[in-house]
Amino acid sequence: KEENAVQIDPARFLSDLHELRKFGASGVGKGVVRPAFSEADVAARRWLAGRFEDAGLRVAVDAMGNLFGLAEGPSLLMGSHSDSQPEGGWLDGALGVVAALEVARAARDSGGPAVSVVSFQDEEGRFGVTTGSAVWAGHLSQQDADGLTDHGGVTLAEARKSVAGMVTGALDPSQFTGFVELHIEQGPTLITAGEQIGVVTDIVGIRDMKITFQGQQNHAGTTPMHLRKDAFQAVSAFNTLLNARFRNVVTPSTVWTIGHMSLHPNASSIVPGRAVFSMQWRDGDVDRLDRMEAIIRETAQEVATTQGMALSYGSLLGLDPVQMDSGLRGALERGAEDVAGGKWRQMPSGALHDATNVSRLMPVAMLFVPSIGGISHAFEEDTDEDDLVAGVRVLAKAARGQGLTLC
Ligand code: HGY
Ligand code: MN
Ligand code: MN
């Protein structure tokens, strides 16, 4: 059995992973600042393209900036994303891309199955939710995507000019037999249990929309409290009411977040006239996501009426929950038992991943390695290097297992 194994090179893998971190390295811990289409993101994509070529893979880039390293003929696709949050860790996405590269070249070296690699663009949603893979999978049209704006008002159409020089054309998904994504867990489950691998059962659904309260900008010293139309007070009341009203609808695994807010004009001595904020909620059940949406809209309307605000909404973005493919999952479970016997589990993913979109095109599966302290989307994000390598080993075993199944 072992002579058929795909032999990964842990030192080569870790060296590439550390090299990728240099693009947008934050200087704080191992953090990175590499948002989609930024200079650091494009430079990282160019470097990755070179590494794909060195590995004998053919480089292809679509109009969104999704970067592929293609093996000949039908292949198993592996990868993740190399863009980061505005403040992100070095592993979120990057791990899955570099691990896929290592498995692809190790598979070539050992005459193993054909493995292609991808780094999707804007997984972190500078412009929406997993935008690059959403467009590739046909969940979102390029035209609709182009009209999306980031928090600074830049359109995606404008931002993607930064990758125009790399674009080779549309990329046909039918050449891929399945998609497997290795990722850090980004939560506390594995690290708390002292386990090394999580095999993902399903990925939660998400809804995300901008909400605007428009009140009246005015002087903060002279405007009596009862005459104010203060947009921040509206957000504050909305949040308190919403938390109370969600109580009878949510489960312990439901989450909701107001993560971005812009107050206009954002000055100490001005009653803010406008508040624009992000409202995001996630759950594994579509009905619950819908009920939460109804509560959000009713509550916002009630606050707007009570406080004399105009209320408006941005587009509702979202992805429904998805189950992982049982065949690919089985290959990962066998790999997990080989590599981390007794120290792995099946688990759902509370974070969103490109795999959700790709599941519209082909069978998908995911595996997790632990996050130290359960921390991610922060500069402190990290994982023990032994666990990183264990994840790549499971991926390689699954590639081998799946390759045999496919042959
Ligand atoms: O937000 C998420 O779950 C992912 O990191 N894009
Ligand atoms: Mn990620
Ligand atoms: Mn992320």
Image (cartoon, rainbow, N blue to C red):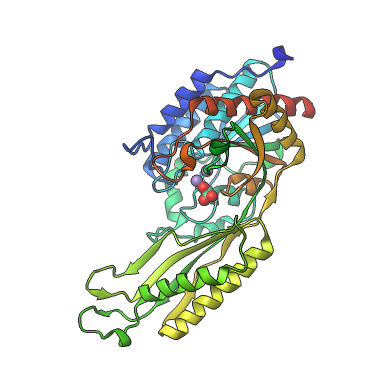
Query: Where residue 155 sits: x, y (%)?
Result: 44, 58
Query: Where residue 121 sits: x, y (%)?
Result: 51, 45
Quadrant assignment for the C terminus: top right
| Residue at point 66%, 36% (across, down) | 345
Note whether residue 58 is visible. no
| Residue at point 44%, 85% (across, down) | 306
Relative side of 302 to 223, left or right: right
Query: Could you say which is closer to the camera, residue 211 or residue 30?
Result: 30
Quadrant assignment for the N terminus: top right
Relative side of 45 to 113, left or right: left
| Residue at point 44%, 59% (across, down) | 259
| Residue at point 29%, 84% (across, down) | 225
Q: Quadrant of residue 404?
A: top right
Relative side of 383 to 354, left or right: left
Is 344 situated above or below 86?
Answer: above
Most extreme residue toward the bottom is: 227
Relative side of 68 to 385, left or right: right
Query: Where residue 8 sits: x, y (%)?
Result: 59, 19
Note whether residue 292 is visible. yes
Most extreme residue toward the front is: 193
Is 43 situated above or below 260?
Answer: above
Query: Could you say which is closer to the camera, residue 342 or residue 186?
Result: 342
Query: Where residue 370 sits: x, y (%)?
Result: 54, 35
Query: Could you say which is closer to the camera, residue 373 or residue 215?
Result: 373
Total numbered labels:
0
